Image (spheres, rainbow, N blue to C red):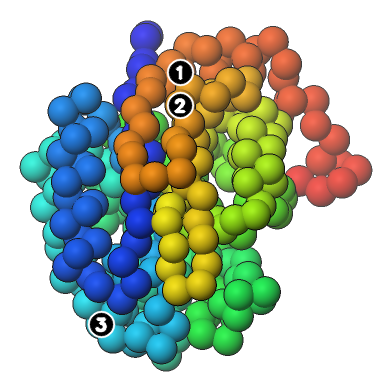
Amino acid sequence: MERIVKAAAIQFNITLGEIDRNLDKAADALLRVNAENAQLAVLPEMWSGGYAYRKLPELAAQTPRVLDKVCEWSKNLQMVIVGSLPEAADGHIYNTAFVVDGGEIIGRYRKMHLFSVMREDDFLGAGDSCLVVPTSVGRVGVAICYDLRFPELFRKLGLEGAEILCLPAEWPVPRQLHWRTLLRARAIENQLFVAAANCCGRQGKIDFFGMSLLIAPRGELLAEGGGTATELVAEFDFAEMDSYRKQIPVYKERRGDVYGNLD
């Protein structure tokens, strides 16, 4: 049966610590990709307020309100929406990616690899579980930004049945080459679609380059953003993924008995 999903990656300059301004940016972008019939949209990492470390408790306290808006958008636009937000729980603040489908939160993933170079581990708690969740657009696996440098996580998501990998990020200048190379590698080696949304512009003293990407399982770049606010939309053709997996059966032929099953 033919299965094609229209996916979108949304990038914008996150206004540090200003939730309502970022809500307006996200809402406008979602309306634009909805006009192109997008069924899945990925927003950047910590898109409601950025890494305003000193304001994280205040920003996290507003996340339930933000999620109410995301659920409203998802229901009204009939769209799966993925993006990460600060979440207060268990005495910690987590960088949590929420998967919203049909107006309901159906999954959440807490970033497990914290970027010590940017002192994330001083302000955030680390998650300790993976997420693959069935949605109206297929089985979605989720990772966040720095997670991209840990291929074991992505293989585990693939083994757990992920078909689309959604990755919100705040990936800064000057590591564009790593971003592009690692995202394509994760798509190719795990034979799945990737929708990666990076922010752009400047937050504090840090510059972000955008370059959001929509990638096919064979590594083809279906759409790539530049350095300014934009939305990407492309078709994910599941028949192409199925064909690739039959041609090169890496899941069947991997040697988990030697180097670990990860399942």
The residue singled out by tag 3 in the image is: 61
- The percent coordinates of residue 52 (x first, y second) are 40, 79
**Which quadrant would residue 6 be assigned to in this image?**
top left
- Identify residue type, mark 3: Ala
Q: Nearer the viewer, mark 3 or mark 2?
A: 2
Q: Give the structural element (helix, strand or loop) at label 3.
A: helix
- Identify residue type, mark 1: Phe
The residue singled out by tag 2 in the image is: 223
Of 159 and 172, the residue lying toward us: 172
Q: Give me the residue at 44% from left, 36% from top.
A: 225
Residue 89, visible in the rendered structure: no
- Identify residue type, mark 2: Ala
Image quadrant where one finds the N terminus: top left
Q: Give the structural element (helix, strand or loop) at label 2.
A: strand
- The percent coordinates of residue 12 (x first, y second) are 34, 51
Residue 59, visible in the rendered structure: yes
Whether residue 65 sits left or right of residue 4 in the image: it is left
Q: CA distance from mark 1 to mark 3?
A: 39 Å
Q: Which mark is residue 238?
A: 1
Q: CA distance from mark 2 to mark 1?
A: 17 Å
Q: Nearer the viewer, mark 1 or mark 3?
A: 3
Of 192 and 161, the residue lying toward us: 192
Whether residue 19 sits left or right of residue 187 in the image: it is left
Of 223 and 228, the residue lying toward us: 228
- The percent coordinates of residue 229 (x first, y second) are 34, 45
Of 93 and 208, the residue lying toward us: 208
**Which quadrant would residue 248 be assigned to in this image?**
top right
Tag 2–tag 1 contact (CB < 8 Å): no
Q: Classify 126 as above or below 221.
A: below
Return the disc, 3 or 2, that comes first in the chain's sequence: 3
